[in-house]
Amino acid sequence: MAHQIAIIGASGYTGAELIRLIALHPNMELAYLVANSKAGHSMAQVYPHLRHLKLPDLVTIDQVDFSKVDLCFCALPHKTSQEVIRDLPPTLKVVDLSADFRLRDPSDYEKWYGNPHAALDRQAEAVYGLTEFYRDEIAKATLVAGTGCNAATGQYVLRPLVANKVIDLNDIILDMKCAVSGAGRSLKENLLHAELSEGYNAYAVGGTHRHLGEFDQEFSRLAGQDVRVQFTPHLIPANRGILATTYVKGDPHKVYETLCAQYEAEPFIHVLPFGETPSTHHVRASNFCHIGVTGDRIAGRAIIVAALDNLTKGSSGQALQNANLMLGEEETTGLMQVPCFP
Amino acid sequence: MAHQIAIIGASGYTGAELIRLIALHPNMELAYLVANSKAGHSMAQVYPHLRHLKLPDLVTIDQVDFSKVDLCFCALPHKTSQEVIRDLPPTLKVVDLSADFRLRDPSDYEKWYGNPHAALDRQAEAVYGLTEFYRDEIAKATLVAGTGCNAATGQYVLRPLVANKVIDLNDIILDMKCAVSGAGRSLKENLLHAELSEGYNAYAVGGTHRHLGEFDQEFSRLAGQDVRVQFTPHLIPANRGILATTYVKGDPHKVYETLCAQYEAEPFIHVLPFGETPSTHHVRASNFCHIGVTGDRIAGRAIIVAALDNLTKGSSGQALQNANLMLGEEETTGLMQVPCFP
Amino acid sequence: MAHQIAIIGASGYTGAELIRLIALHPNMELAYLVANSKAGHSMAQVYPHLRHLKLPDLVTIDQVDFSKVDLCFCALPHKTSQEVIRDLPPTLKVVDLSADFRLRDPSDYEKWYGNPHAALDRQAEAVYGLTEFYRDEIAKATLVAGTGCNAATGQYVLRPLVANKVIDLNDIILDMKCAVSGAGRSLKENLLHAELSEGYNAYAVGGTHRHLGEFDQEFSRLAGQDVRVQFTPHLIPANRGILATTYVKGDPHKVYETLCAQYEAEPFIHVLPFGETPSTHHVRASNFCHIGVTGDRIAGRAIIVAALDNLTKGSSGQALQNANLMLGEEETTGLMQVPCFP
Amino acid sequence: MAHQIAIIGASGYTGAELIRLIALHPNMELAYLVANSKAGHSMAQVYPHLRHLKLPDLVTIDQVDFSKVDLCFCALPHKTSQEVIRDLPPTLKVVDLSADFRLRDPSDYEKWYGNPHAALDRQAEAVYGLTEFYRDEIAKATLVAGTGCNAATGQYVLRPLVANKVIDLNDIILDMKCAVSGAGRSLKENLLHAELSEGYNAYAVGGTHRHLGEFDQEFSRLAGQDVRVQFTPHLIPANRGILATTYVKGDPHKVYETLCAQYEAEPFIHVLPFGETPSTHHVRASNFCHIGVTGDRIAGRAIIVAALDNLTKGSSGQALQNANLMLGEEETTGLMQVPCFP
């Protein structure tokens, strides 16, 4: 029998993306779709592109019988997520897509997110959800904390380089170009079509973006020393995609070989031939990540560009990949959809 | 064993879209990908979004052993398609995506396309590929002529209304809004991003668009009398999608009921609740077509709006749907991908 | 000395567009910029593209000394506009950009806008602001009611045809394609980039759009009989522009000649050579309107396509054109900016 | 009497942009528009957005009587430009928009552009056209070499910092986001709407972009030592704009003060309040450049973001600014157009 799945926070973009993917999963069934503010509506009303699917109507969380659920995705805003997950049955498998369990040290959480951690017990057992690097822990976990979409992209580039110390750890720049769906279905002036189309800008400049908390935690852990990167996100007039241009000091061929060795057997991470560069176009609506390495005319410098879809590989696709592991499914099931181009 | 498939004209957008769909088809295998001008290249070079797939390299048509092919998709420009299909083994199952076999009367072909028909023999046996209306013939056909993308959209709206004579046949207006991929991967000035983004315009105004040949043929046949519609396409700054706003004279509720009755059991055609209108957003990258019916404040007038993805339901998805029928597969296999939103 | 100008409602898109135009007007000076919700802010904070201009800070309406103002633009939402204009000095020249004084009959206003008219006294003297057709009245008016942007576009096409009865008055279809800035800087889900980019749809289908009130009023008045048109707006993924595709019954050459004769001497309305069609691209950010006429393969039918920029010719440019007349300036002053392409 | 102006290469985007600007210049008159491949056409045929202007038809260069021309803009592709300018009357004032006279050392030209310099005589007298830094030479020059659009953007950020040595000259990274019109009206696959919209990518990665020739020349000259920067351009789905995110080592407040001091009196270059970042939206279709400075959480690092419109300030606007100086006009005449937002 198919695994019974609940999605809490089904009315946001990552909730809708989960449904898009799970609808074609041969061994999962959507038992509950929770969205307190839209309870009573059908999914077709909230997301008409899901109209053809036979889906349960949206309900409040009180209406869920969790004893009938095998795994629960939680796609809520941060802070709310801690409060909700704190009260879920402790043995229920949960994949959280928010930021609420990503930072191991609760004081880091408070520093970056501004509020005290509200589910310290659950934090202790949470596994960081970057699948390719925490596979075994994820497979055994009850609570998996999905990564930030920018945090995933940057780590795919940098983890192997930091771990193998093939680059200068004091001089790492991540210049990211982010599509607008990363901000969610939220009514903010700068997300309006009229404000965004045909224009672009940097934001959270100067080391203030919250995903830095994840970079600091993971890179320092890998290196066994404090590592601080520079990270500047930019808002680009597109709906899906993250492109991370990474500037490092190190031998570009060693960088290339290190990444090739790391990802050789990975189904979703593809290192392009040396000197080629990826495009967000070529991974859109898919779970793939393309990485390209180039040298510079200045010796000893390498530029690594990575592209992924923030809603899929950066969020809901990653979540499903982790859920597959937690439920004993093939990791790639339901995730081999070909990128949509053009 | 999986059906062995060839795609002739694999380097265009409809070719790439066929590969995107067939890659996930459980019972089809891509044996040959033909693109004379790009022969020798890998698909990853021509379409990097297909990089992760194990695909045969591009070859010339001479390199194909058609005895090993169960079905061949032909995604070539019109005129070329007739010349190529004329020389294929006559028993080979073929789905043609071009305009070359859509018009039953070769003089209609010459009138709309400007050149004499070069494969009269094959024309005689060609079946018009609008699946929902020619299912039985398609299942038995050797050669199926895929419809024009605009022609498909307009027919989904109008066929049931014309056949059932619930509208005035002398006063039908199709105002279509078409995304740019319908023009293919061709280097034309008006298809450049700088020329198209943020602007839009009508084209082929006044009854000159070639898809009118299909409308004339099909509607006149259905009605048993000459039917001529007005059809104005517009180029919209988007990559995928056709939206057809149809103005007819007739009772809107009768129109609605006629469409509901027609499409009730169809897996891909969805009639929205009366008064709702579809968006191309909600069918993008999928094989679905959404149709909405509304009345007007002027009694006796109805407005029907239909949305589909020109590359999928309007072309390559339709082609695969037909191929499924021709090969004895379930019609929907490989085609249930959920629309990609946002 | 330059005319002293106030803009009430300076924080919306039409307010910003007024400032963009007036900044280059040789004989106007912006004395007051009113935006109650943003009072105390500089315009550079609200609209950074105006950063280089020396502009007064935003104030509340109470802070304005209207005795120092020669003309006031009112760019407020409807309903609010009536309440504000009702309380302005009665001799102050006012150009209202809202819908509040467009409909001569207050019961029409209530019918289309849902609330009773709150400034009946002022309504009596209001002049409808379609410059090319009400020039003399506008020059003498104290209160001018700017037209709806769709209403302007449709009237440029249809007024001469209705007045000269060269078309069938019972069978007029306006299919409009509208860019998103027409909806203003308002936080609505369907105006988000992620909801709109790459998708498009009809809205207010079936004779429910409020600009029909203006069409009914003006066309019936011109024809001396009730005229009801069909009008369907569509939301297009672009920031500026309206394209109106108009389907009429009549001789296309007579239609063409009628429009040519009407607009021959107009500085802003350009009729293209017969058979050519306009693009919103070619009028963007300008006060020009391009109109193209085509016949159909069906005799006795004409298709007229008009393009203008909804924020300029459809709203703030029209307002400035009217203000020029009211202040005794050349009608075209400050309005000859060349369209921005690409 | 107005200055008589010729534009050679009037059918490209920079030619059209020159016309857009000059049309409103009170003291310039367009005497000749040259476009060999389109000779005989009207500008309205090539660029319908210029339809309302009274412009001379396009001619071949042989048809120009240069004795009647006061200043000639040359908007041709590189290589062609040298051949054409070599044969112009040597006393004719010329503003070249191509790359052909930007590099003082002809061997640098050959290195970056691949062909030997074909107009060495003229090179000797050419003045580099970055107005704010070469004003006096430009005013006296006969031949001014317009800068690359990326080269201009990067220099506005870096020249004051390099000249005043407030940053580490060995560690400068320019990550640029470029709109598509920078590539001109050229028929290349990657410039198609379907290939570009909704996707983005880096190109010319690793120190291969030709504008590096200008950076090397100018920064080394300023510093009195070899300076090599890293520069990675990215293609963004937008029509106009360059955003340059610059990563340097140095005290951010010193960086800020240096830029403020440099640009305090400049009419077109605006340094935003410390910590704010610019957007291409806010300079579109204008001659302004906005620069924002931010520190990083890592001490001793500064991030400077600059935005300008590649067609205006980056090319045709700069050219007109230089022409004004060469003709004794106010530098800002015809260039104060307010950015077009939204």
Image: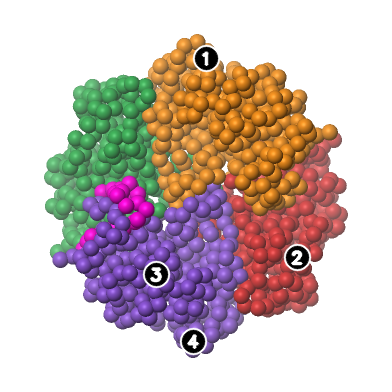
Chain colours: A purple, B green, C orange, D red
Determine the residue positioned at 68% across, 30% down: C88
Disc marking residue B238: none
Farthest residue in the top direction? C224
Distance from disc 2 to disc 3, alpha carbons, whole Å, reads: 45 Å
Few, some or many C-alpha atoms within 10 Å of disc 4 (few <14, some 14-19, many ≥20)? Answer: some
Q: Position of residue C297 (x, y in %)?
A: 39, 24
Determine the residue positioned at 49% across, 89% down: A224
- Secondary structure found at label 4: helix
> C133 left or right of D142?
left
Count the labels in the image: 4
- Secondary structure found at label 2: helix
Disc marking residue A223: 4
Give, as a three-letter code, the residue at label 1. Answer: Arg
Of badges 2 and 1, the one in the foreground is 1
Q: Position of residue B319 (x, y in %)?
A: 25, 48
Is residue D290 in sight in this rendering?
yes
Q: Which stretch did the figure color magenta?
A: A25-52
Of badges 4 and 3, the one in the foreground is 3
Q: Nearer the viewer, residue A157 or D71?
A: A157
Determine the residue positioned at 44% across, 37% down: C234
Residue for badge 1: C221
Few, some or many C-alpha atoms within 10 Å of disc 2 (few <14, some 14-19, many ≥20)? Answer: many
- Secondary structure found at label 3: helix
Residue for badge 3: A82
Q: Is residue A296 above or below residue D329?
A: below
Distance from disc 4 to disc 1, alpha carbons, whole Å, reads: 80 Å
Residue for badge 2: D259
Give, as a three-letter code, the residue at label 2. Answer: Leu
> Are the residues flagged by discs 4 and 1 in contact, CB closer than 8 Å?
no
Please tell me if label 2 and label 1 are on a single chain: no
Chain at numbered mark 4: A
